Image (cartoon, grey):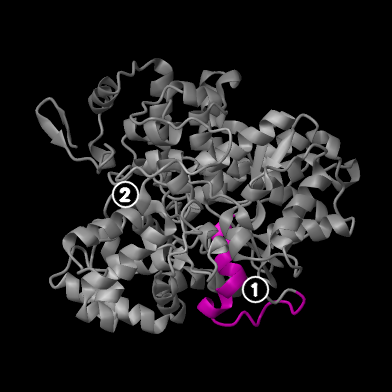
Amino acid sequence: MPIEVDGTIYDTDEEGYLLDFNVWSREITLKMAESDSCELTDSHWEVIHFLREYYEEYQIAPAIRILTKAVGRKLGKEKGNSKYLYQLYPEGPAKQACRYAGLPKPTGCV
Amino acid sequence: MTEKIDFDVPEIPARIEDPGVQPHASSHLKPYRAQHQHQEALGFPGELVDGWQEKAIDKLGELTGKYRSLQVFMDSCMKCGACTDKCHYYLGTGDPNNMPVARQDLLRNVYRRYYTLPGKLFPKLVGAVDLTEDVLDQWYTYFHQCSQCRRCSVFCPVGIDTSEVSMAAREILDTVGTGQKYVNEVIGKVHRLGNNLGLPEPALADTLEGLEEDIEEEIGVPVRLPLDQAGADILLVTPSADFFAEPHVDGLIGYAKVFHQAGLSWTLSSHASEAANFGLFIGSYDNMQQVAKRIRQAALDLGVKRIVFGECGHAWRVAYNFLSTLTGPLEFLDTAFPSPQHVVEVTHNLLQSGRLQVDPSANDDKRVTYHDSCNVARGSGMGDIPGGQMLLPRQVINAVCNNFFEMPANTTGDATFCCGGGGGLLTDELIELRVKGALPRMQALQTVDKAHDITHMVAICAICKSQFAKVLPYYGFQMDQILSLHQLVGDALVWKVNEV
């Protein structure tokens, strides 16, 4: 199910993850969130930006501990936990947030 | 639960019972098919091959010739019906093709047609069927609705193991070019990067450093998680989910604390940064061997004397039964530890010999039960004593936690129910199957919960942990009610100032 934004079509896998990390744009995320009826707040974007930064450096999504620590640093310690992340992203930070951030889906026993 | 659900979650029944046959109830559930790149990375054709029918039949003949067990399983079913209500996927879906005998028959009927005289001469009389595209499609569907947990085989009077039948069927499917994406993509990542996640060495190193900081912050002790440390005594091979996910990571922290307090010298390896071996799930000896060889190589390169496996069910099944058969001899290991050990065995020994200081009251906020992972319970052993794989984890839990309660006996030990996500089915497009397949375990959990007010269920398998974290909320439990066994252990360790 490719995503169309402003007349350009972006390829995704079966579950809507972008096939190419580099084609990502804010507008693509907005489009994904719109089809999920998810309203994106600044907190959602903090997670998305961190995921992109981390992936650019390491070519993999961050482990949950790394993500929660980063969120805690940026949004306040009380939010640096996976419960908060699941409030933001009910399908799971590793899955929904990665998709919004243009990362591939984490694989394996997770 | 705010995630969208487009199927009916079953009500938890008062007891586990046959739901009644509902034909085709799960015929729409199938995993994504592997694409060219996933197939070819494993040495399989990228798409359904020309002449697939003949090739599949030949492969079936090759496999029954190579694996005597498979031949016996094909020939020996007497349709007694003992297995029919033993599979969690049948109990959860009611689809008759999820009765183990029916699942086996999908392959057996084709075997009869091409490899038995009555089937060749009078196919209709003996239920033999031609291998058509419909049959191939049914194989794809229902051999991906078997988690290879072997519960049915415990109740089969002649010991037919549907797990091996499903492995053979998947091997045939891969051979003709129609494999499953989730498993094959993961195996490709292990071949390329050493683990299921595709975690490169710099990310692993960064993750471990972060965990060391967390532990020191928590307990004030500089516990290390060494990576690629040549000359260490122990190589710990653990599922990569332990680096990445919750509650797995709390188990990893627990192993590190145990090793630290016992003064054991250990290391992780970036070359063998995965315990899991999905090659088992697709019955591919070649892929299983290739994955396993990374462990021997890492052990040799690092010069370790022992190999210890972390909390991963099927990894332990492979390691316990035939690691050195796959990898070649592990003759360089310490003669006191000539074959791989499970981390539960290590902790158990340390507790018995008084080398760990524990205070079980540290876990007094928890009332726990224990889920026997299928591959550990029915596919392995521990501690060189009969049933040790059931006993040792329980003895460790009892040593570190005052409130332990069993689920009903017909759902534990070698009669344990699969979590619903094993055998290569832990993929989101199968969520309906996973939720329904978890029903028997949820029933057992609810039973012990009602009697004893359980706060947590403990497991020693990465798949079980991820599966439960995902499906518990569908049944009114919380995702964080599933714990790693070694989290309990780690939390109960007492640290003295002079150990710092």
Crowd band around label 1 with a 10 angstrom C-alpha radius: few (<14), some (14–19), many (20+): some
In the rendering, at what x and y percent does residue A78 appear? 60, 19
Q: For this rendering, which residue is in front, B338 or B495?
A: B338
> Mark 2 — residue?
B31
Q: Is residue B413 above or below residue B72?
A: above
Could you tell me if the residues under marks 2 and 1 are in contact, i.e. CB atoms within 8 Å? no
Q: Quadrant of the C terminus of chain B?
A: top right
Q: Can residue B117 be found in the magenta stretch?
A: no
In the rendering, at what x and y percent does residue B367 appear? 74, 33
Picture quarter containing residue B162?
A: bottom left
* Chain letter of the residue beneath label 2 in the structure image: B
* Chain letter of the residue beneath label 1 in the structure image: B
Question: What is the three-letter code of the residue carrying label 1?
Answer: Gly
| Residue projecting furthest to the left | A7
Same subunit: marks 2 and 1: yes
Query: Could you tell me how far apart the alpha carbons at marks 2 and 1 are, in whole angstroms?
Result: 41 Å
Q: Is residue B295 above or below residue B183?
A: below
> Mark 1 — residue?
B303
Crowd band around label 2 with a 10 angstrom C-alpha radius: few (<14), some (14–19), many (20+): many
Question: What is the three-letter code of the residue carrying label 2?
Answer: Pro
Q: Secondary structure at mark 1?
A: loop
Q: For this rendering, which residue is in front, A26 or B405?
A: B405
Residue B94 as seen in the image, left or right of residue B122? right
The tag earlier along the polypeptide, 2 or 1, is 2
Bounds of the magenta span?
Answer: B312-336
**Residue found 60% across the figure and 62% down from its top:** B378
